[in-house]
Amino acid sequence: MTDLGTVQFTYDGRVALRLQQAFPHPATRVWSVLTDPDRLRAWFPAEVDFDLRPGADLVFRVTPEQTRRYGLAPDHETTGTVIAVRPGHILEYLWGADTLHWELAHDGSGGCWLTLTHTVEDQDDAYAHAAGWHAGFEVVEAQLDGRAIDWSPWDRAEELADAYRQSA
């Protein structure tokens, strides 16, 4: 993935980070990477089990890597709520004050486009998250292609962080 994404202000003064990537895989396969807890553990920045019903409560637990790298308490949790679910197409939920909107669109050739819009309170937060999601998308791509991941998405996010800061 080479596109660094876009950052725009919303009508209510919040900031929306938008990342998009094409995958040569059906939307149903990409959907599984977004919702299956076992697959999420490889790339998602929290441990969460999705209850895919609108209105369902979510609990995001800190990962051991976040505890090691950032000193977060191992029992730290953040809550959220599922807003919308359209299997294979749309997943939207709150994670604390942030809104994450995942959308899958068929590309007409058997693959799909994955678009993440992560809406946060301020611009600095958007750029801080961008490198992590970018690295996560690289893991998703490897999972879908059946390639082993022999690198750390956390280290990769740190490598990408400078490019995102410079684009601000």
Image: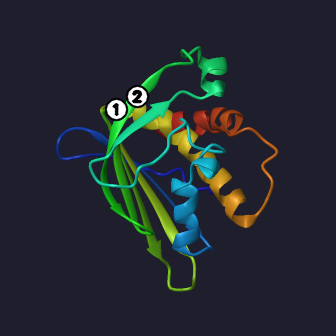
Q: Left or right? Give the position of 56 relative to 107.
A: left
Q: Nearer the viewer, residue 12 or 6?
A: 12
Residue neighbourhood size for the residue with mark 1, other residues' Cα within 10 Å, grouped as few (<14), some (14–19), many (≥20) = some
Secondary structure at badge 2 equals strand
**Residue at the image position 60 percent from the left and 52 percent from the top:** 137
Pointer 2: what residue? 78
Q: What's the amino acid at mark 1? A: Gly
Q: Position of residue 79 (x, y in %)?
A: 36, 32
Q: Position of residue 51 (x, y in %)?
A: 41, 50
Is 24 situated left or right of 130 in this image? right
Residue at 41% of width from left, 67% of height from top? 87
Q: Quadrant of the C terminus?
A: top left
Q: Amino acid at mark 2?
A: Thr
Residue 130 visible from this viewpoint:
yes
Q: Residues within 10 Å of mark 2 (few under 14, many from 20)?
A: few
Which residue is more in the foreground, 45 or 116?
45
Residue 28, disc = none
* Residue 74, image x, y percentages: 57, 18
Residue that carries the numbered disc 1 in the rendered image: 96
- For the point 70% across and 58% down, which residue is it? 143
Labels 1 and 2 touching (C-beta < 8 A)? yes
127 shown above or below 115: above
> In terms of secondary structure, where does tag 1 sit?
loop
